[in-house]
Amino acid sequence: MSINLNPPNPSAAADAARRVAGIPGATRPGDRPAPVADADGSKLVVGRNIHLKGEITACERLVVEGRVEASIEGKVVEIAESGFFNGTADIDSADISGRFEGKLTARKRLRILSTGRVHGTIRYGQLEIEPGGEISGDIEVVAS
């Protein structure tokens, strides 16, 4: 077994960086690739300590970890265990681990996880409730 106690040679690192420059698709150490657009398109994440009020438009996916008091028309709403949504949501599907209060229309699917609480006027295409999840209020199935 051989142990090298000599400090690294800075010119060797520079030579390696120059060699990488000629290889298609290769990056040098420290190079950061350009940010890639979110695969979901228009995504909004409301962090744990954020409180957002208003109207949310052109949002394909809303992730609520904090508190939202708003109306939204979109595709998907995810409410994390720490999240709270109060307002109106007209969406395709929802996954709720936190709390929702208000008017919710999930045209395709409403999924309430074990820590989820949903109260209000609820319309859904399909309903999934894990043991421990709660739903209450005016509830009905929407025609698909």
Image (cartoon, rainbow, N blue to C red):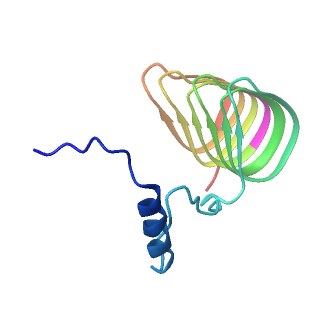
Q: Position of residue 114 (x, y in %)?
A: 47, 23
Image quarter of residue 51: top right
- Name the residue rendered at 61%, 56% in the picture: 144
Q: Is residue 26 above or below residue 4?
A: below
Judged from this view, the residue extending furthest toward the right is 54
Q: Position of residue 35 (x, y in %)?
A: 64, 59
- Name the residue rendered at 55%, 55% in the picture: 30
Image quarter of residue 98: top right
Q: Quadrant of the N terminus?
A: top left
Q: Position of residue 46 (x, y in %)?
A: 72, 35
- Name the residue rendered at 72%, 37% in the picture: 104
Viewer-closest of 124 and 79: 79
Give the overall secondary structure of the magenta segment: strand
The question of residue 138 being in magenta is answered with no
Q: Is residue 48 above or below residue 89?
A: above
Viewer-closest of 49 and 100: 49
Give the side of residue 64 with respect to residue 33, left or right.
Answer: right
Residues drawn in magenta: 84-89
